[in-house]
């Protein structure tokens, strides 16, 4: 091995700041002026440096100017924090992929470890920020952005095979980014459903070094293959050896939930929340699990935390508000529960949310002994889904069924709703458990489990009929079978994907028409809305595009 | 539960009770760290200005800046050890380019080295990458460099190379070497901490702890102290798997 003396008197690379706009976000005046001075001695033009003292001012600047560099303190006094500013900026596309975002923190945080999420900054920089530390960080991020520019572009266009071959090309020559390139390549193999290839690459990586992200990725493959026990073991081992790698803990909690081990999932989430309490999503998940475990106070606390964390965040969901309202009601505080629903209706104004909130409101009245009001809401809901044609989403349908069963509403209608949900999700163990619970609470446990079994079997049979017919070469019959299946189960992801598959195969055999292309496209779009980014969706979209290009 | 009932009992005798001293200590360390950060930034700013070298107090300012950085490093070590004890440290090994890493780490000391007329050599293979927690190892190397600066005559050598499948980081000086007591406890730096001597031992304890946290494929990092080496002084040797 050869080893060279390092010339430490000059920086490794010169920075080129010409024409670059910079934003500094910090609530302390001294810090802002220190950062400005450091930037200017790095070469930034002082008149292109802008400053904001809080989150709202920062968003104001981001809307006005296209920034190349943002230095943002994580803690910004009251209002939005640095992370929430970043989330909003990315969500509203106020910053492009070439913008370099550095989060400045007093000390290393748990959030800095994951490093893969959508709303992550390019780097965290610890105080005190010095010219040397900022300079080296800027150089590092710039070269990384350059290395990944083409790859990210291909990924954005969902051209995963091109992205993958770009990764391979770079891997052959670029040692500096080898670790990140390999990780990206594995992500790409996973999203395009090439599990066996992904597994092979991951095992090669793990033979050299114990990397927690690679183990988590292997566990994801095991989950996809429904090998829950193996996934659980691998994740437990990974979480134990790398307690700061919270992605493993979240994935473990998810696995345990799928396995029906709520207690285990709750313990894992509670541990993760202690390490990193500021995740809107994790707190919400903890709320749901605690609620199902009957730990009502814990559930209320977790939902409340999720709601308050989400207040300034684009990641807030109606789900956390509904969970909080239900938890308050279960804790015998119906007044508080109704107040939460009021806030919810102010923040989210879609039909889906309105219907769900109304069903939950009915249940709150039912639980507080106001039977008349509960019945009135139940009837109102029956009316809107019956006559006004409002289609509740999956959670909404369950909430409505729960209310109809409890408040003496139209039981037939409730059963019909539940049957539909089973047929749309016959492979989701969690949903089937929820449906069983609703029957149980209505004192119809036995009848319910029979109904679940027959609906499930019926659905499985219809779902695959078209694919079976295609494999026998009966193209016309396959197409009409899948169309029937779609009419019966319009929100079943397998049906939607199978319908698209059958149409595409039919067109490959018999030629395409604009109508069939449109039908396949709609089916794919609906599938992607139900569960975004499924590997099968990606493959089918690629085949459809190929077919159109051939035409 | 037991803690609460105890507290009630002692309160009846009207003795004030310090209820969770650890929390006060931790939040004070945070607070001090923020102030020291501002101090360092301020001094850096003064020292980088053109006129700084002309000031009659230039020597004192350089020394003050160095002391402020030492305090900052100590506070970081304390906070890190606390978090490690509580199992809440966000340990995060990443692939690091040793060339960049050493360049950035020693840049913080460039001014003082120049001022004290100490010659620092850094030897590293430009294509060398290794997995470690950059913040922790930067603290360890900074601490070793600080020690070397106190004991060297005028020459320090830092090197990084792959050795028997591990990364070997060495900080060597041309001073009198480590006292025999420190070398005796070798292999267990944690036991050789001498709270009565001038050095609190925190730095070595921290370094040994950090070395051991680094694990891969069943192997664990370690810290060795030796005398001799290419400069015939103290050698601080860190192995990372």
Image (cartoon, coloured by chain):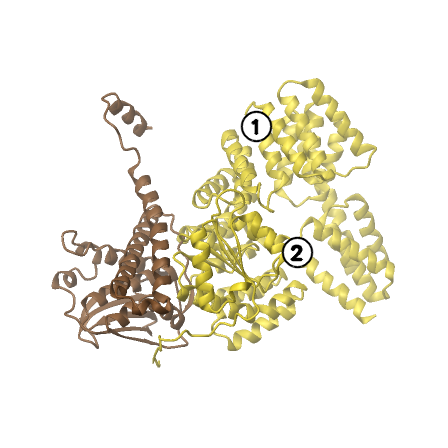
Chain colours: A yellow, B brown
Q: Tag on residue A533?
A: 2
> Left or right of A508: which side holds A104?
left
- Give the number of the mark in front: 1 or 2: 1
Give the residue at x 53% y 57%.
A116
Report the quarter where the C terminus of chain A lies. bottom right
Query: Residue A207: where, in percent of width, then height?
Result: 44, 66
> Left or right of A259: which side holds B58?
left
> Left or right of B114: which side holds A362?
right
Give the residue at x 14% y 55%.
B197
Query: Residue B13: where, in percent of width, then height?
Result: 22, 22
Q: How many marks?
A: 2
**First reached walking from the N terminus: tag 1 or tag 2:** 1
Asked whether residue B133 appears in the rendered view, the answer is no
Q: Residues within 10 Å of mark 2 (few under 14, many from 20)?
A: some
Can you name the residue that lies furthest to the left here? B180
Place residue A389 in its image quadrant: top right
Q: Residues within 10 Å of mark 1 (few under 14, many from 20)?
A: many
Q: Are callouts 1 and 2 both on one chain?
A: yes
Position above or below: A432 against B115: above
User: SS of the residue at dot 1?
Assistant: helix
| Subunit ID for the residue under disc 1 | A
Position above or below: A338 against B239: above
Which of B227/B118 is in front? Answer: B118
Which of A468/A409 is in front? Answer: A409
Position above or below: A165 against A84: below
Report the quarter where the N terminus of chain A lies. bottom left
Q: Tag on residue A328?
A: 1
User: SS of the residue at dot 2?
Assistant: loop
Q: Tag on residue A290?
A: none
Position above or below: A545 against A459: below
Asked whether residue B181 appears in the rendered view, the answer is yes
Place residue A404 in its image quadrant: top right
């Amino acid at each position: 091995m050869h080893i060279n003396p390092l010339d430490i008197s000059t920086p490794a690379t010169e920075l080129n700041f010409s024409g670059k706009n910079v934003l500094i976000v910090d609530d302390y005046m001294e810090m802002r002026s220190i950062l400005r001075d450091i930037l200017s001695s790095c070469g930034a033009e002082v008149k292109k440096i802008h400053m904001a003292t809080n989150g709202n001012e920062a968003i104001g600047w981001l809307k006005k100017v296209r920034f190349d560099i943002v230095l943002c303190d994580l803690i910004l006094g009251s209002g939005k924090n640095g992370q929430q500013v970043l989330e909003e900026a990315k969500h509203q596309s106020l910053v492009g992929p070439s913008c370099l975002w550095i989060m400045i923190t007093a000390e290393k945080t748990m959030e800095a470890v994951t490093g893969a999420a959508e709303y992550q900054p390019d780097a965290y920089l610890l105080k005190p920020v010095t010219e040397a530390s900022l300079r080296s960080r800027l150089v590092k991020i710039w070269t990384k952005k350059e290395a990944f520019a083409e790859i990210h572009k291909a990924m954005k266009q969902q051209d995963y095979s091109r992205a993958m071959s770009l990764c391979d090309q770079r891997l052959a020559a670029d040692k500096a980014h080898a670790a990140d390139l390999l990780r990206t390549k594995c992500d790409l193999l996973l999203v395009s459903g090439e599990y066996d290839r992904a597994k092979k690459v991951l095992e090669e990586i793990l033979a050299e070094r114990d990397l927690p992200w690679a183990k988590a990725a292997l566990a994801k493959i095991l989950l996809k293959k429904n090998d829950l026990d193996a996934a659980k073991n691998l994740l437990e081992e990974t979480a134990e050896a790398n307690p700061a790698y919270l992605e493993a803990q979240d994935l473990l909690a998810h696995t345990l939930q799928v396995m029906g081990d709520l207690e285990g999932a709750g313990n894992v989430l509670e541990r993760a929340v202690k390490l990193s309490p500021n995740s809107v999503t994790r707190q919400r998940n903890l709320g749901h699990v605690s609620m199902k475990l009957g730990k009502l106070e814990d559930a209320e606390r977790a939902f409340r935390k999720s709601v308050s964390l989400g207040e300034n965040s684009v990641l807030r969901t109606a789900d956390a508000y509904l969970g909080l309202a239900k938890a308050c009601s279960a804790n015998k505080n119906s007044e508080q529960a109704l107040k939460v629903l009021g806030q919810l209706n102010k923040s989210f104004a879609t039909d889906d949310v309105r219907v769900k909130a109304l069903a939950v409101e009915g249940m709150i009245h039912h639980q507080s002994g106001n039977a008349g009001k509960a019945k009135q809401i139940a009837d109102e809901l029956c009316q809107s889904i019956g006559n006004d044609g409002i289609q509740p989403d999956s959670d909404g349908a369950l909430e409505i069924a729960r209310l109809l069963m409890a408040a003496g509403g139209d039981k037939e209608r409730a059963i019909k709703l539940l049957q539909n949900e089973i047929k749309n999700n016959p492979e989701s163990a969690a949903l089937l458990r929820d449906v069983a619970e609703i029957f149980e609470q209505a004192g119809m446990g036995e009848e319910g489990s029979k109904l679940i079994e027959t609906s499930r079997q019926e659905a499985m049979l219809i779902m695959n009929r078209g694919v079976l017919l295609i494999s026998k070469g009966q193209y016309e019959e396959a197409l009409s079978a899948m169309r029937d299946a779609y009419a019966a189960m319009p929100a079943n992801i397998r049906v939607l994907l199978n319908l698209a598959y059958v149409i595409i195969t039919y067109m490959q055999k018999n030629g395409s028409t604009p109508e069939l292309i449109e039908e396949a496209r709609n089916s794919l779009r609906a599938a992607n809305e139900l569960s975004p980014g499924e590997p099968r969706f990606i493959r089918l979209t690629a085949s459809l595009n190929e077919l159109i290009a051939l035409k | 539960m037991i803690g609460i009932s105890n507290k009630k009992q002692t309160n009846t005798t009207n003795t004030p009770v310090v209820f969770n001293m650890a929390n006060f200590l931790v939040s004070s360390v945070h607070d001090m760290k923020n102030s020291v950060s501002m101090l360092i930034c301020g001094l850096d700013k003064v020292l980088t200005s053109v006129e700084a070298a002309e000031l009659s107090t230039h020597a004192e300012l350089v020394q003050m800046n160095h002391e402020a950085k030492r305090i900052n490093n100590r506070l970081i070590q304390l906070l890190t050890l606390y978090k490690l004890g509580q199992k809440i440290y966000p340990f995060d090994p990443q692939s690091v380019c040793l060339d960049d890493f050493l360049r950035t780490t020693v840049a913080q000391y460039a001014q003082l080295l120049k001022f004290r007329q100490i010659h620092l050599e850094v030897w590293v293979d430009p294509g060398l990458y290794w997995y470690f927690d950059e913040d922790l190892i930067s603290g360890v190397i900074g601490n070793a460099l600080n020690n070397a600066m106190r004991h060297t005559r005028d020459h320090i050598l830092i090197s990084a190379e792959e050795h028997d499948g591990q990364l070997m980081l060495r900080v060597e000086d041309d001073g009198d070497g480590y006292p025999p007591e420190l070398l005796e406890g070798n292999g267990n730096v944690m036991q050789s901490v001498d709270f009565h001597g001038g050095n609190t031992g925190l730095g070595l304890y921290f370094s040994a702890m950090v070395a051991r946290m680094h694990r891969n494929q069943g192997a664990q990092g370690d810290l060795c102290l030796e005398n001799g080496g290419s400069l015939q002084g103290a050698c601080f040797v860190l192995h990372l798997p």
